[in-house]
Amino acid sequence: MTLFLSRRSAPEFHPSEDFQTSQAAVKLDGVKSRALETGRGRLLVAALVFMAAYGGIALRMLDVSVIEHSPDAKPAPQASIPAGDEMARADIIDRNGVVLATSLPTVSLYARTSELLDTQDAAEKLASVLPDLDVDETQAKLSSAKAFAYLRRNLTPRQEYDVNALGIPGLYFEKGERRVYPHGSLSAHVVGMTDIDNKGVSGIEKKFDPRLTTDHQPLRLSLDIRMQTIVRNEVARAMSDFNALGGVGLIMDVKTAEVLSMVSLPDFDPNDPPPATDNSMFNRAAKGVYEMGSTFKLFNTAAALDYGTATPTSSYDATQPLHIYGAVIHDDHPEKRWLSVAEILIHSSNIGAARMAMEMGGANQRAFLNKVGLLSPLSIELPEVGAPQVPNPWREISTVTVAFGHGLSVTPLHLITGVSALVNGGDYHQPTLMATDQPPPGDRIEKTKTSQAMRDLMRDVVLSGTGKNADVPGYDVGGKTGTAEKAVKGGYARKSVLASFIADFPTSDPRYCVLVMIDEPQGTTESHGFITGGWVAAPAVKRIIAAIAPLTGMEPTLQSQQAPPGRHNVAQAQ
Amino acid sequence: MTFGRTDTSILGRWWWTVDRITLAALLLLIGIGMLLTMAASPAVAERIGADSYHFVRRQFIFLPPSVMIMIGTSLLSPRHIRRLATIGMLGALVMLTGVLFLGAEVKGATRWLSLAGLTVQPSEFVKPAFAVVAAWMFSSARLEPGFPGRAIASGLYVVTALLLLAEPDVGQTLIISAIWGVEFFLAGLPMILVIGMMFMGVLGGVAAYAIFPHVQARVARFLDPQGGDAFQVSTALNAFHHGGIFGTGPGEGHVKLILPDAHTDFIMAVAAEEFGVLLCLGVVFLFALIVVRGMARLMSEDNLFVVLAGSGLLVQFGLQSIINMATTLRLMPAKGMTLPFISYGGSSMLALALGMGMMLALTRKRYGTEELEA
């Protein structure tokens, strides 16, 4: 076939243009012939372009039909599910390799709505094998204008088989995975959870979302699930014994600041989470900020000793309530005498602590609190982190009240991290939820001597002070009680308290700190109506230490230290 | 059909002067179009709740008038073609204006006009009319010094393009622009302006991208098929693969059950799945044959108006087919464009028959002075 016909030899003369003069006609014919030459040349270009385009289309047709064997894959809504047993999201394990979060392969049922022939029939048949499926709702989904409709996520293999057996066209199974938390609520506030699309929405799951989806190695946390179990049980028991609103339990390795246990009650089951606004979703341990009360006297004492404005044998006048800056400072257990530094802690004297702080000065106090991390948010690996509420400006009255833990709100995690630094020899480490073999060097916050003094003082509190209920024979527990009246509108509520106890053990060379904090305990007959840290939180700490100490391979010391009677009694010393 | 060489009746002369190979190719395309409409449209019709053969019946109603229009138009002389196109252009402009006020909105655009019970898409008719009228103006400008043909043709282009953009119908605007550009090019536009026009074309594309959100969405989908819903195109490509060389056989495909536009923009996917890539290559060959052969015949033509008008008509026809197939094959961003004579659509078929009839008329062999007073 001839596509290009041979060009006729020469333009003809057209008599139709006879009305023109012959000269004009010739001239016009010249113009016309030049125009035609240009047009013909350019038309050839256009024809070649069209041929090339059609040639390209023909090649592409062959390419997608014959050569390209998997064109564009299927238009499935999700991709990147690895083949084989490997899951898209890595496991989360505790320090000993116990699985805290893992993924199981599942299939989800979806419909390509345009392929369905009879939506009503399909919905009814589906409901016959998936009884909890609502027929009308399903039918509406199937008839919607959307190309894809998820009908049911996470089918069991049996359900998958049954749906397949129905033989309904347009229904497909999407290979997927489902996050499973074998321990349920046990470490819910740390591990967090994912949404239905397997995207981390809280806790470690959120913080490490990119890591968990790119690196398939399990993520090893610092948690010890055995300790976590013990702590949760004991905090829950204290809560139920004292009819409390909530509770916090923490264990920290004082040398590395690894968090071995973090419990915040009430908690939730990440396998079946409550609405996001539910009270149980709130992590009191890391996000909640509270006025901690008397446990702060540890920082106050350490600061005064370290700055040298006080020595363990210094004494302060606690004979009268302290009237200062328009406020009156009382003691809860008034001794009405001069108290030594040790006695201030043992009897938890607000007046003594206030006088120590005033002697040290607000600037020193503030600088020390900053060194132990109490004035800024912690860099723990959680999205839920509370920022301390720091008095601004820091007036003299702030110096007085912060001395015994009021006017400055921090998270329970701040408290245990700070106390760990006080007793570990004086090195402050950022708290972490990652298992570490070699912690980075800490920041020096105090002299070694001060740290040694703090251990002794805390031990004294347990031996002869408000912390007697926390003593565990053989493990040299040291600690400090805290009973903070909760701030309510215009003042403090005497009956609503946060009862807490912070302990370290063994005091000879502390390895762990334990903190229990109970929110609004109610007095019981066993506690003689007391709702103080010594009666509410200290027994829980005692039971925790008694249970976890054997797990750590720590041997009990055979003879328990006894406080030499009257050793710290200023009146006798004088 | 046989005519003696000595037969000088209108039909006799037509038979010996018309390009019978192109005519046969066009009729074959129309035949394939009918076949594919029968293959693809029942599934679509059932899906929208209409009777199975709703689209087939409507398309077959348009078949006889279309063939008659094509052959009837091809009997005309270039001068009559010019007159017909001029009248058609005026009518189309009136209808395009009317569509803006009286048209029915379908899928976000107002493109259809109801005329005596028939819905007409004026934008289909304006294309061939514009190709011929613009060619007349360009050739007159070249041959009669002082005649402002280029200005008239360009003014006409601007008015038509604005009316089309108001619908909005970016695809038809693109076709009209290509017709205007190619005719201007063939009519001897200086090279510097050719480059300038290409630049304007790019600028026009960028402007369309900036102004129309659906243009942006389609480009985004083309560049990142996983990102958005490139559902129709991915499905179409799967259909090509599913069909392979010989296809699954008539009725055996399932892409028609899925694609909303299986009977219009994506009809080649149905063809590929059920009849194989061989039929698709055949269709591509027919389009290439008609366009390239038409242009080849025009190259030996002595009348500038005929060259320009014929080329404009072929550019319209060819570009539509290229855009349609390239979209289906994901060689370019999705652009709703029907495949000439193959896709379902009455207005489109009538207008194409008119355009190709005019093309056939213009490419007829003319000896001596016969009907050449253009």
Image: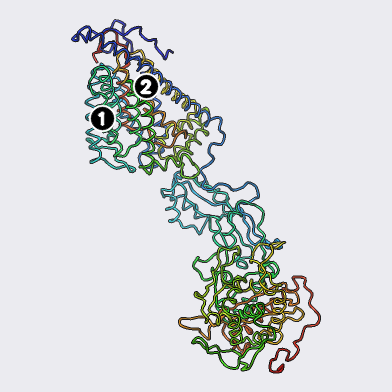
Tag shown at residue B26: 2
Position of residue A173 relative to residue A470, above or below, is above
Q: Which residue is mark 1?
A: B156
Q: Residue at x 64, y 71 (%)?
A: A417
Tell me whether the residue at label 2 lies in contact with that at label 1, contact meaning CB atoms closer than 8 angstroms: no
Residue at figure coordinates x 69%, y 66% from the top left: A256
Name the residue at the right extreme.
Answer: A558
Badge 1 element: helix
Q: Splitting the image into 4 quarters, where does residue A384 fall?
A: bottom right
The crowd level at tag 1 (other Cα within 10 Å; few <14, some 14-19, many 20+) is some
Is residue B8 something one can see in this rendering? no
- Chain name for mark 2: B
Q: Amino acid type of disc 1? A: Leu
Location of residue A520 with respect to A75 vertically, above or below: below
For the residues labelled 2 and 1, the Cα–Cα distance comes to: 29 Å
Q: B27 or B315: which is nearer to us?
A: B315
